[in-house]
Amino acid sequence: MTVPQLPALFLSPAESCSYLPGRQANYVFADPRIDLDDATYARLVEYGFRRSGRLVYRPHCNGCHACRAVRVDVSGFRQRRAQRRTWQRNQDLVVREHDPVFNPEHFALYQRYQASRHRGGPMDDPDSSKYREFFLFPGLGARLYEFRTPGGELVCVAIGDQVRDGLSAMYTFFDPDAARRSPGTFAILWQIKTARDLGLDWLYLGYWVRDCRKMAYKSEFRPMEVLEDRRWRPLVEESTAH
């Protein structure tokens, strides 16, 4: 099998870290001037890269390695008690896959989610052009899933990619009024099951930061592997979630 050649990589200027206050962050990103093929993109995902629209990147911070790429072993995954309750609570939802194209209803839900959950954050921006740029880039196995009640009410949208050996979860947003359903957790559980049904090995969950509370939920999906020193290893730390 021919191993795809990786594109040129570039280092971004330093900026404020969005995960750990008082720190600076840098990112390496694949040359955005070239069109990545599926095989090259899949290899980058295996090396811990993420995607935001056309931009494929990973953290590369001077003296800091807090951001660690993680992936769930979908064949070994077993739901915990709270996850089983969440799964059962949402069995009425109807999930449909759609092309990654602009939908005003999806965008309105995204605006409500950001205003409620991340007000003042870097993504609390009602600009539809940025929403399109971040989430609706076609190709590279892009997937968009919507979760609706039997009556048609939109509860949640999950956006991600399908790569050679797994699904890569990019972003999920949901109706703040449906928080009791734990729709974010359910979307991950649903993607784990979908990856398993497709015969894939992993659900890539992006970056886990041990000391960042908003990232703590990721460590609840075990068994999980973490990328360290260019090798995927089992994550053996105890969960920081409560």
Image (tube, rainbow, N blue to C red):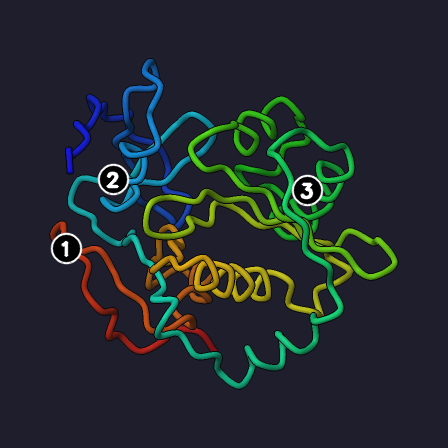
- 83 with respect to 198 (left or right): right
Residue closer to the observer: 98 or 27: 98
Q: CA distance from mark 1 to mark 2?
A: 13 Å
Q: Secondary structure at mark 3?
A: helix
Name the residue at 25% across, 31% down.
Answer: 28
The answer to whether residue 24 shows anywhere in this view is no
Of the numbered discs 1 and 2, the one sitting upstream in the chain is 2
Name the residue at 59% across, 66% down.
Answer: 186
Point out residue 227 in the picture as x, y percentages from the top left corner.
21, 55
**Location of mark 3 (residue):** 110
Quarter of the image with the N terminus in it: top left
**Location of mark 2 (residue):** 43
**Location of mark 1 (residue):** 231
Amino acid type at mark 2: Arg
Amino acid type at mark 1: Arg
* Residue occupying the far front of the picture: 1
Which of discs 1 and 3 lies nearer the camera? The answer is: 1
How many numbered circles are shown? 3
Of the numbered discs 3 and 2, the one sitting upstream in the chain is 2
